[in-house]
Image (tube, grey):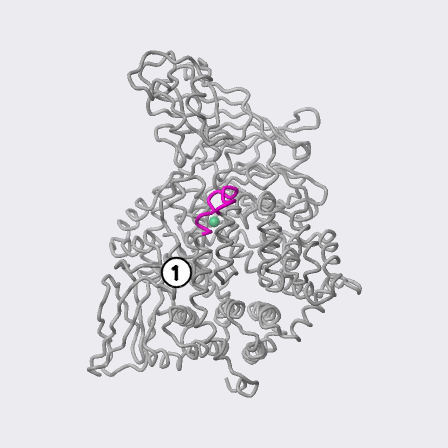
Amino acid sequence: MNKKIPLALLAATLLSVAGCNPEEKAAQKPELQTSTSAVTLDLSDAPEGKLPQGVSPTAYRLDLNLDPRQDSFSGSVAIDIQLAKAANHIWLHGNNLGVSVIKAQLTDGREVAAQYRQVLDSGVAAIEFAELLPAGEFTLLIDYSADFDRNLAGLFKVEEQGSAYVLAKSESIQARKYLPGFDEPGLKATFSVSLTVPEGYAAISNGPELKREAAGEGMEKVTFAATPPMSTYLLSLSVGPFDIVERPAIPPSKYRKEPIPLRGFARQGRGGDMNYILDITPEMVETFENQLQRPYPFKKLDIIAAPQWPSGATELSAAITYREQRILVGDNPAPGARLALVEVHAHEIAHMWFGNQVTPPWWDDLWLKEGFATWGEPLVLRIMEPEGGHDLNAATYAIGAMQLDSLASTRAIREPVTDNNNIRNAYDSITYSKSLGVINMVDSYFGAERFRPALGRYLETFSDGEADSPSFYKVIGEETNTPELTEAFRSFVEQKGVPQLELLLDCTTPSQAKLHVSQSRYKALGSPIEETGQKWNIPFCFSSAGSEQQCQILTRKEETLDIAVNTCPSWVMPNVQGSGYYRWNLPEAQWQALLEHFAEFAPTEQLSIIDSAFAAFEAGKLPAAQLLEVVRQSARVEKRQVITLPLNYLRKYRESYLGEVQHSAFLNFAQNLYLPLLNNSANSAEPDQQMLHSELLGFMALVAGDPDTRKQLVDKATAFTGYKTTRDPEALDSDLYGPALTVAVQDAGDDFLSHLIKVRGVLDDPRFENASASAIGSSDSPSQLEVVQKLALSEEMGPRETFTLIQYSLAQPEVQEQNWQWLRDNFDKVVDKIPAQIRRRTPAFAGVFCDAKRLQELQQLFAQHGALTPGYQRSLAQTEERIQLCMALEEKGQSLMEALPRSVGLAQNI
Ligand SMILES: [Zn+2]
């Protein structure tokens, strides 16, 4: 469909043009015969972002015929709408819908004819009425039909193991593909849903099921209770031959009188694999209630394991829906799978309050739901599993966000979203993990006892409604009576970038030591970030040898703090508990002094040291030798998160800067640091040590290229898949699927690939299927490329798997050139194949590159074909910048590789 319909055409197709109008432009516009005062419809006014104010839905009554065995569906919706003033047209959403009947029903029962017309490709439609509707309430009645989507967007159909399922994935703006309505988060309304489905099929929506009655021809009509006011992106409509797992209701709690019915849904035959998530749910719900001092806000809780769900999980109100491999883990999941499960589950349950009960009105305030849901993970998990390392995990996520936040092309947590095509760009680690870091910083600086009751008050104030950031700041400010707290929030939420603190310990007068601190925006070598005098209100806590921690909010570019000791401290630690969202740097001697005490710091502080050291190295401020010392220190502690934080950097440096002659030096370095840790953790019963073991195996095999580790993984993979031997299902735990299958594809012999393709078709194991997609993409044999590339576009690969496969195919140096060429030659086919929701991220395929030629080719690709992937500009800018920064670091990166100890003898001394 054309983006805009020319006005001339419009005039010809609409009712006759009435009256005479002095303005030529206006004279071309259609004007309704009965209207003398209404604003006339001008299709060029179609809103690209928010809908115009003054038209609000209050209730939907949705009645659909959903048979997953068919390819399309039909039904009707009645929407009660409040008009602030009289109107002859309204704007709403609808995308590729076949509207057969549309009319308005006034409060006196009279019906007014209407016309529906989709105006924008993003799903913006105009409805024009045959007469002026008065201000007040009316009901819009629509009969319509549409095809089920086959690309996991909107109301989509998937087939798994011979059965068809229909599921609705609406976030962010895909409800409009199956529902004409107000597809905008702030326009909440109640939903009364009924679904006519094949007899015996499970049907899930947001309200509890009220009744089921025969509807003839092998169909049943299922009616659900009305929901509280809800946004369209949270609608749940799931139909199929699901297994239903009934659990005892979650008992009443201190904050809630009614029990909550709890059920699990998985595709046929897999219900038994949901025990783990169902077992932990009651305690998790109650822990949230206690922390937020607010009751769970819905009348039931369904947990759905959805085949091919395009996101990891989505917080549909009272019907949380997961990509099935995230939660179909059996009774005894591998530790990495288990950790991922408890984190994602805590996140989704947190959403029942943050996002579902209190909803950000527009996507620019996405952090108010995603940041708080991410923060909800450590909030409850540290209570449920005190030894689980959840604070450390949270710290690593915030550090992960700093890498993206160091780019000039990053976003602020809160930034205007004016175009529908840009909405999904807000779903990045800035919104999720930077927000987590900022909320954690504020919570720990000002104290949970001050911050959390205010948070509960915010939820209470806006319950069942909407709240934006200014409303949040206002309530939090009033409740805590601490203006510095809201100012700290505001300065981190509204500004992009990571604060960099340059510190200098000044002992000119030893009895009165001082700390000079200056703040600026962090930038790496080659960064286009310009000095603008930007500053933050930074909750800053430091400690020093022989003294307690000292805290202060930094508000100026430069400050000098007195250190509360009477001798010059031997070291200063600039981020106590690692809870500050900032990076820091010290003069070389003071780095050295700090590193001598590395093992004594808290693990979250060690994470801050490692992050700041890599950041300083990439800014050209820390020498390679000192950075290597930090890496060595990190491998001498116990905590998995500390040991593994440098691994991604080392992988990147090795891929980009390692010369041929240094391969053995890198291998030696890695063997010396990590083989002892691998051995120590080999038979550990501790889940965290087991995870460490898996991560190190992957690193040693895939990055360092350690022959023994590779052999070990090949043996596991061939035994597990029954390659040239009988299959041993116990040979490989699911945390190792990725590395083991990858090494096997590369080392086990050419026909392992075809064997793997066969096995993944037979084995009903979604985690295996997903991991095998990355392994297949990692083939480094030119003779197999044709098979791999064909597979990528075939029906055998799910849309998400294709994305994964291609991503990995570009990371293989041996065949990178051929794969890159193939991607550019087949870009339109690839875009067609991958899920609509992630198409805008296709520039990131090139994120592994580090040279000017490929950068230019990337730019050419999107100059030519960018239109196929609306909203790609953000991802392209970030990928371009990453490539440029990688190029700018080349000299330093090489110096680091050259600083690796030359021989085994030397290496043993480290
Ligand atoms: Zn979320």
Q: Of residues 768 and 708, which is closer to you in this image?
A: 708
**As drawn, is 97 to the left or to the right of 418?**
right
> As displayed, is residue 267 above or below residue 723?
above
Q: Which residue is mark 1?
A: 406
**As drawn, is 597 to the left or to the right of 470?**
right
> As displayed, is residue 2 above or below residue 169?
above
In the image, what residue type sits under mark 1?
Answer: Ser
Quadrant of res 400: bottom left
**As drawn, is 490 to the left or to the right of 151?**
left
Residue at position x 49%, y 29% in the image? 180
Where residue 393 appears, as percent x and y from the top left, is: 47, 63
Residue 247 makes an appearance in the image: no
- Highlighted range, magenta: 863-876
Where residue 118 appears, as percent x and y from the top left, is: 48, 27
Where disc 1 sits, the SS reads loop
Question: Does the stretch in magenta take in 528?
Answer: no
Residue 501 makes an appearance in the image: yes
Quadrant of res 403: bottom left
